Amino acid sequence: MKKFLMAATCLTALAAAPAAVAQDKQVNLKISFWVPAQHPLVPATKKWAEDIEKESGGTIKATLFPSEQLGKAFDHYDMARDGIADVTYVNPGYQPGRFAIVSLGQVPFIFGDGHKGTQAFDAWYRKYAAKEMKDTHYCFGFIHDPGAIHSRTKKVMVPGDINGMKIRPAQ
């Protein structure tokens, strides 16, 4: 089975950058996720947004939109590009062939663990992000531990646990 890998990029629309730099007026960033509110990325991003607000003296605030409130998972890159959201959580694996360079991170058996793999993947991809995702600003990319199976209804610990389940690979 292909290693489940999610390369996610945090993308900031170009339109938001000039307003954030000026800081002479209130800026409210729209941050969109396709994952549900209880997913670990949402509270982590909320904390990040709170830190930005504090460091900006309250001039930069953020509103989080989880659970595809602003658009489907497939659309999140285009939502950042088109200004529907200022920051989005993107899974390039949902659009096979569109992001050929970043998809190399989904080759099985490249990374032994998510933490070290994330560091290596992000450092490597930064050289290519401006070219491949030129309509947006790349913030970071990450991967899961290899072989992880995510399920909201059943804990998968041994191969037999997947009996009767529908499973999809990253691509």
Image (spheres, rainbow, N blue to C red):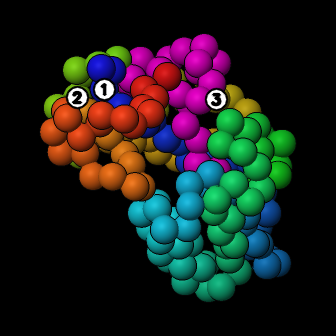
| Viewer-nearest residue: 104 or 16 | 104
**Element under disc 3:** loop
Amino acid of disc 1 = Lys
Report the disc number at residue 133.
3
Q: Position of residue 83 (x, y in %)?
A: 82, 49
Question: Which residue type carries mark 2?
Answer: Phe
Q: Quadrant of residue 92?
A: top right
Residue 97 shows in this picture: yes
- Would you place residue 143 above or below residue 154 in this image? above
Label 2 and label 3: CA atoms lie apart by 23 Å
Mark in the foreground, 2 or 3:
2
Q: Amino acid at mark 3?
A: Met
What span is colored magenta in the figure? 87-106
Mark 1: secondary structure: loop
Within-10-Å neighbours for mark 2: few <14, some 14–19, many 20+:
many
- Residue beneath disc 1: 3
Q: CA distance from mark 1 to mark 2?
A: 10 Å
Residue at 77% across / 72% down in the picture? 27
